[in-house]
Image (cartoon, grey):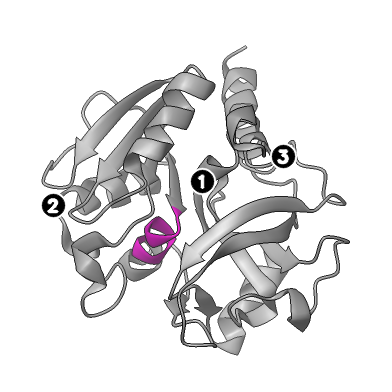
Amino acid sequence: MKFGVVVFPGSNCDDDMRHVIESVLQQEVEMLWHKNTSLEGFDTGDCIVLPGGFSYGDYLRCGAIARFSPIMQAVIDFANRGGYVFGVCNGFQILCESGLLPGVLLRNNNQKFICKNVYLKAQTNATDLTAQIDLSVPLKIPIAHAEGRYHADQATLDTLVQNDQILFKYCDAAGNEDAAANPNGSLLNIAGICNKNRNVFGMMPHPERAAEETLGNTDGRVLFESLLKAKFASVS
């Protein structure tokens, strides 16, 4: 599988993502400048990653300006053809702003930037990103955001539940999904979702920051490994 990591002005997790994909997972990765207008060289079995950071300084709203970067039309077309698109933190915000995912990320309910390890549980095995994750085991993965509070109207929330589109919910170390374990006030404790076609994924926690032994935490690696296993299974 080939990965393309989009770099926006203000991205600061692009090299982290490249390191994990290239050095830890031993996969091909290409850095894609936001002014590119095509994804030439990528097919629908590949994955485009929108990394974390502060695209365009988070002016207006997080992701609101990046959504209009030239490369985003190519990303939208790629997703609509069935290609994998994975947005982490600011990347999740950009996916929501671009309409590839429903809802919006609002300012944390404590009105502060939060940077810490949290726990989350996968809610479904019905996506290639989560197919290999044990739904009963909490994952410890860090967050680093000021606007990570997932919000949507009730009809959208109902649709996410009915279509099994909620990928992750915040929980505590024992797996309890309650208000006390919710770091930012996200509705339904949502930490990540996917689109109806199950090829566009967005999440606020940073799995690339928990993917190698050097950091003392490999809980995030299973997401990448799940995606790779699904890809290799499809071509075997």
Residue 215, quarter of picture: top right
Which numbered tag is attached to residue 199?
A: 1
Q: Is residue 45 left or right of residue 222?
A: left
**Residue 131 in sight here:** yes
| Image height of 81 relative to 193, above or below | above
Q: Mark 3 or mark 1: name the one nearer the start of the chain.
A: 3
Residue 234 place in picture, x, y as percent: 60, 22
> How far is mark 3 from mark 1, CA to CA?
13 Å
Residue type pointed to by label 2: Pro
Circle nearer the viewer, 1 or 2? 2
Residue 36, quarter of picture: top left
Which residue is denoted by mark 2 in the rendering? 70
Residue type pointed to by label 3: Ala
Magenta part of the chain = 88-94
Question: Dot 3: what SS?
Answer: loop
Crowd class of label 3 (few under 14; some 14 to 19; many from 20; radius 10 Å) = some
Main structural element of the magenta stretch: helix, strand or loop? helix
